Image (tube, grey):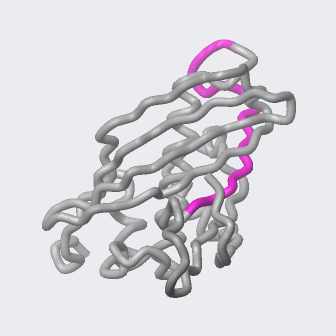
Amino acid sequence: MTYAGPARKIDVDQELLDTILKPYKPHCRYLKRMTVEVPEQPNGDPPAPYLARADCDFEIPESCYIDETGHLNAVEFNICFNQAYYVITAECINSRLVPALNDMTLEHYKRRHLPDVLIHDLSSTFKRVIDRSRFKGEIAIADCVQTSRFIYFRTYCSFQDEHGGYAKGDVTLALMFGPEEDEES
């Protein structure tokens, strides 16, 4: 997904990335680096095709659940998407990049990102085999709608390797959104 207008770019801090991926077993932390981009839209510019997008680097030295397949598969696609989504959302909260998330603090999100994020719809398409040992990814938050209980995110993602491997996906998620004072200490 491209945007020709001006954009703000943020390299996600390694400490934030490590904190958000901490619930994953160490050998399942596939996301290694992320740079988030948010369009800066002066008045009169056409709307950007996303609220925020990120470029990602992934490495999967070996599968966490199956004998060697030699390529990225659907389970790993989903894990990589989840990790990218959790981290881009954390950066959007941390840097106040998406207005729908402005009422949430990073501390609240850190406590609640696993139990409160629900995949509503996921589709993936594999065009060419991807070497999972090292590959690139992109995730974009296309738009979001807030209700009294949820923020629904429509997202897009793609993964590609240096040999022409390619897969893409469309994912709609629901982030349950409740007041922080409901949290237990």
Q: Along the horizontal axis of the image, is 129 left or right of 87? A: right
Q: Measured along the vertical axis of the image, is residue 79 above or below residue 178?
A: above
Q: Measured along the vertical axis of the image, is residue 63 above or below residue 121?
A: above
Where does the magenta region start and end? 53-68
Residue 56 image point, x, y percent: 69, 53
Query: Magenta span: helix, strand or loop, mainly?
Result: loop
The answer to whether residue 55 is magenta is yes
The answer to whether residue 61 is magenta is yes
Q: Residue at x 64, y 63 (%)?
A: 3
Q: Measured along the vertical axis of the image, is residue 167 above or below residue 103?
A: above
Q: Quadrant of the C terminus?
A: bottom left
Q: Residue at x 73, y 26 (%)?
A: 130
Most foreground residue, 169 or 20? 169
Most foreground residue, 38 or 21? 38
Q: Residue at x 16, y 62 (%)?
A: 149
Most extreme residue toward the right is 163
- Give residue 103's quadrant in the image: bottom left
Most foreground residue, 149 or 63? 149
Q: Residue at x 51, y 60 (%)?
A: 49
